[in-house]
Image: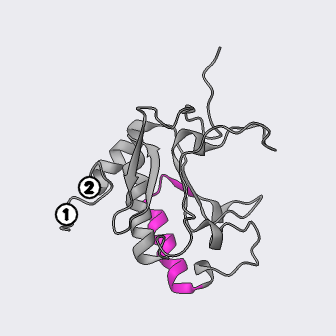
Amino acid sequence: MSKQTTIKGWPVIKDGNSPMLRLFTIPGTKRKMRLRKDVGPYLVAFAAEYHQQIAPIDKGTFDDWAWAPVRDGRASSKISDHCAGVVIDLNATKEGSQSKSNTFWARHPIKARRMRRLLRKYHLLEWGGDYKNFWDPMHLVIKTPDVAAVVKEIRRLGITPTGRFKNVIK
């Protein structure tokens, strides 16, 4: 039997208690996310900068998600990248509408520029706001299943195993 993989080719992690996963706290918040432990720091560092520069993720409803188990009966025949712990959804109740009619930070020109800057910095992330077939602005996924490439970016950016930056004192 072949190993199950996600849309982007990541191996599926079926159990939330898997040693491949770790519970991370987003720096600057009390939000916790279960992510693949070797690439999680990359997502956590992005989420911390998003929280500071774009929109707070720790206000109101708990609507920030990461790893999720495989769900039977999905409309798609492909397995979500959430099942590999390589995705974060941020501010889902505000930005999760798959309709461009919702109003959120992307309509603000300064915040939209900040997001583009963050996406250039975290160039291994794919943003659901750029999808052609549907709009999913809460969704950010690591677009390559190449763990070595992500770890190299973590080192290049100076991100610690907890998702903080080495040169930041806090």
Measured as percent of width and height from the top left, residue 110 is found at: 50, 85
Q: Residue at 60% of width from left, 43% of height from top?
A: 81
Measured as percent of width and height from the top left, residue 133 is found at: 77, 58
If the image is split into quadrants, where does the C terminus sit?
A: bottom left
- Decide: marks 1, 2 in contact (CB < 8 A)? yes
Dot 1 or dot 2, earlier in sequence: 2
| Residue type at the position of mark 2 | Gly
- Quadrant of the image occupied by residue 139: bottom right
Residue bearing mark 1: 167
Tell me if mark 1 has few (under 14), some (14-19) or many (20+) residues whose alpha carbon lies within 10 angstroms of its own.
few
Residue bearing mark 2: 158
- Quadrant of the image occupied by residue 14: top right
Tell me if mark 2 has few (under 14), some (14-19) or many (20+) residues whose alpha carbon lies within 10 angstroms of its own.
some
Is residue 60 or residue 73 the one in the foreground? 60
| Residue type at the position of mark 1 | Asn
Q: Is residue 109 within the magenta segment? A: yes
Q: Residue at 57% of width from left, 64% of height from top?
A: 63
If the image is split into quadrants, where does the N terminus sit?
A: top right
Q: Please, is residue 82 above or below residue 77 in the view? A: below
What stretch of residues is rendered in magenta? 108-126
Q: Secondary structure at mark 1?
A: loop
Q: Please, is residue 104 above or below residue 123 in the view? A: below
Q: Secondary structure at mark 2?
A: loop
| Residue 121 visible to the viewer | no
Q: Residue at 34% of width from left, 69% of height from top?
A: 28
Colouring scheme applied when the structure was drawn: one colour
| Residue 141 visible to the viewer | yes
Q: Please, is residue 94 above or below residue 110 in the view? A: above
Q: Is residue 100 left or right of residue 94?
A: right
- Quadrant of the image occupied by residue 77: top right
